[in-house]
Image: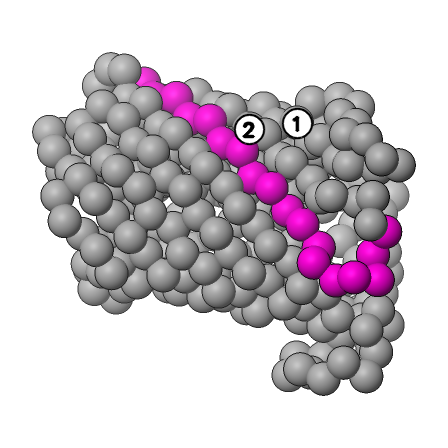
Amino acid sequence: MKKIALTSVLAVLAATGANAANVIDGNPLYMPQKGHFVSETVVGSHSQNDQDWSLGERFGWGITDRLTVGLTTSVTEHAFFENFSWNEVALDAAYRLIDDCAWKLDVLAGFEVTPMRAFHNSMFEKDMTTYSWMAGVRGGYVTEDWTLMAHANFIYTNSGMFNWAYDDEYNQNHNLNLGVAGHWTFSDRWSAIASADYYKTLDSYFDANNHGLWELAAGLNFNFDATKYLGVYISKDIEHNDGGWESQDGIGFGVKFGVDF
């Protein structure tokens, strides 16, 4: 469920003005138009350890103006490649149910295999590989200058691709992800984004004092033109452990490049 720093910050769709041309600039309700491809590349370091560097890539394709599919993967290195991991391969799809002027509503689905290769262990090792299924919704309000978005995702993870049974409860998890994001376009070239995501494991065998994890992020984006942008981001994780909320050491940071073609 945890990705590299800030890969959950997506790109744009706006309703009026310059954004009506489907400008990609970091807006969380962006969807590529029919026949368009999207590439989003992220290089980042997590807040817990600035010696861990990750490279992530997501490709998206607009099948129609309302339906898009995507492929995501990432790799991480630690201490100048002393350890190296290929984190995941994930497929996702989004369908826009409501596209009524400024109001947007999407239904989401996804599947993920992780890790593909980590710490010299090969993919599909029985004791380490997990398979996740996701279903969710996202929606919000889009204007020429700003966007507000909220989403809710349910994620089921198990050690088997199609293992829906509960014969080994410690190998399966039911997770809830809730989030909000805001995007503000304050010039033809510049925009800002902020987001907050909450992750909670719902299974009763986990410690009752563990109330989940907050991921907070903020970024600044520069538009080269209507099809390319570059963003810089910072992030912070806050966990609930031993009966209280605790901010993790350090601040995550990353650089992101997006292109619509």
The percent coordinates of residue 209 (x first, y second) are: 83, 43
Q: Quadrant of residue 120?
A: bottom right
Q: Quadrant of residue 223?
A: top left
- Answer few, some or many: residues within 10 Å of disc 2's Cα (few below 14, many 20 plus, some between 14 and 19): many
Three-letter amino acid code of the residue under disc 2: Ala
Q: How is the image coloured?
A: one colour
Q: In the image shown, does 73 or 149 lie closer to the viewer?
A: 149
Residue located beneath label 1 in the image: 236
| Residue drawn at 11 percent across, 29 percent down | 17
Q: Earlier in the sequence, mark 1 or mark 2?
A: 2
Is 195 part of what is drawn in magenta? yes
Query: Circle 2 — which element?
Result: strand
239 on left or right of 112: right
Q: CA distance from mark 1 to mark 2?
A: 6 Å
Label placed on residue 66 = none
Q: Give yes or no for contact between labels 1 and 2 (Cβ–Cβ under 8 Å).
A: yes
Relative height, residue 28 to residue 230 (above, below)? below
Magenta-tinted stretch: 190-207
Three-letter amino acid code of the residue under disc 1: Lys
In the rendered image, is residue 23 in sight? no
Residue located beneath label 2 in the image: 217
Relative height, residue 1 to residue 240 (above, below)? below
- Answer few, some or many: residues within 10 Å of disc 1's Cα (few below 14, many 20 plus, some between 14 and 19): many
The percent coordinates of residue 261 (x first, y second) are: 26, 48
Q: How many numbered circles are shown? A: 2
In the rendered image, is residue 20 in sight? yes
Assign the magenta stretch its main secondary structure: strand
Residue farthest to the top, as pictured: 187
Relative height, residue 7 to residue 107 (above, below)? above
